[in-house]
Amino acid sequence: MHTVTVNASKKYDVRIGTGFIDRLGEEIAPLMSGKKIMLVSDDKVFPLYGERAIKSLEEAGYTVTVFTFPNGEDSKNIKNYTDLVEALFEAQLTRKDLVIAIGGGVVTDLAGFAAATFQRGVGLVMLPTTLLAAVDASVGGKNGINLTHGKNQVGTFYQPSLVLCDIETLWSLPREEYTNGCAEVIKYAMIVNDGLFDLIRETDIKDQYEEIITRCITIKKDYVEADEFDTGKRMMLNFGHTIGHAVEACSGYTIPHGRAVAIGMAAITKAAVVNGYCTEDTRMQLDELLEQYDLLDDLKYKAEDLMECVKVDKKNSAGMLRIVIPKGIGSCWIKEIYKEECLKWIVLGGAR
Ligand code: GLY
């Protein structure tokens, strides 16, 4: 087992290993003085791990209430949020008690937002069951829900009390879900030069989950500790995301987040080569790695359509936006540009 401690406004451990589902009761015991737990999950994940988690929690003496909703991004909505906080109220959870999220990013985001806002903050434990949630969504405190026309438009920064990455839950991931998470791993390999790029080029991510997740969390921890509220350095974690978010939106959210980020990373790197910020060799190495993980896709949308989505991205401020540009493998920088300039980058990135 590996432990990474995040020292943000709250200090907490991220544990990466196996057996956490069956040890859940003992893992959470030091975190709470209450006896009630709200277990939040979705209808795909709960049947896989719910019973084991409840058994462990009940054996440790906790009273467990379960809240589940349909799997998928559509569930990250205001209705499920209000239903969840009403359920917390009905279960009489207090600030001494705990919300435990078991699932992918939709579950951790929704549960995180409910935990952050119910009674102005109750304890929160994340047990991510997708690679993407393990390396990104469950760590760093971002949570939220979607509005009808905007992703993550409502949410807070609220750090969990503990994150348990049980890699056993990743062994049975569907192919597309695995691929989706690999994109975020490749993102980390592009922004920090710690050998991660070579490691995942030489050995498949799924054959070294514990090592890879630990490295990704260690990288993320540095950015979160330096800039918890995402006003500067943390934006580096958005490599590939400006165009990626636009791709997601243009596809009507049929292209999943990770795959869209992969398209965004390839596009911004292609444009960076043309603009003289990095070499063709860097672009080729990135494309080869994306190809290796079945993530190399064209930017098939019209530049103007992508640009419309960039314009409403919540990361814009006062007509400016920050894009993350690669200098080489394991090295990126943040450039502030006028919103309109982004069109040029999108075109150079290969949009129609
Ligand atoms: N997902 C990027 C961040 O947590 O800042």
Image (cartoon, helix red, strand yellow):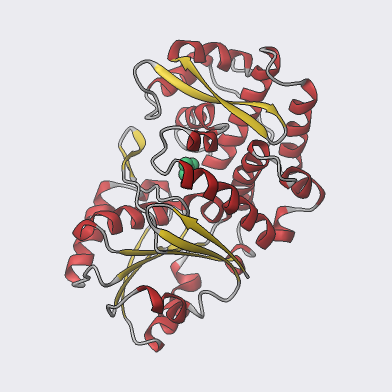
Q: Is residue 298 visible?
A: no
Tell me the quadrant of the picture where the N terminus can be found: bottom right
Q: Residue at x 68, y 21 (%)?
A: 270
Q: Nearer the viewer, residue 83 or 96?
A: 96
Tell me the quadrant of the picture where the C terminus can be found: top right
Q: Residue at x 64, y 53 (%)?
A: 215
29 relative position to 298: left or right: left
Q: Residue at x 37, y 85 (%)?
A: 58
Q: Position of residue 18 (x, y in %)?
A: 60, 72
The quarter holding residue 184 reads top right
Number of callouts:
0
Q: Position of residue 48 (x, y in %)?
A: 50, 71
Q: Residue at x 79, y 53 (%)?
A: 203
Q: Position of residue 305 (x, y in %)?
A: 47, 18
The quarter holding residue 4 reads bottom right
149 relative position to 340: left or right: left
Q: Is residue 64 above or below residue 298?
A: below
Q: Nearer the viewer, residue 55 or 123?
A: 123
Q: Is residue 23 above or below residue 295?
A: below
Q: Position of residue 109 (x, y in %)?
A: 39, 51
37 relative position to 334: left or right: left
152 relative position to 291: left or right: left
The quarter holding residue 260 reads top right
Q: Is residue 33 visible?
A: yes
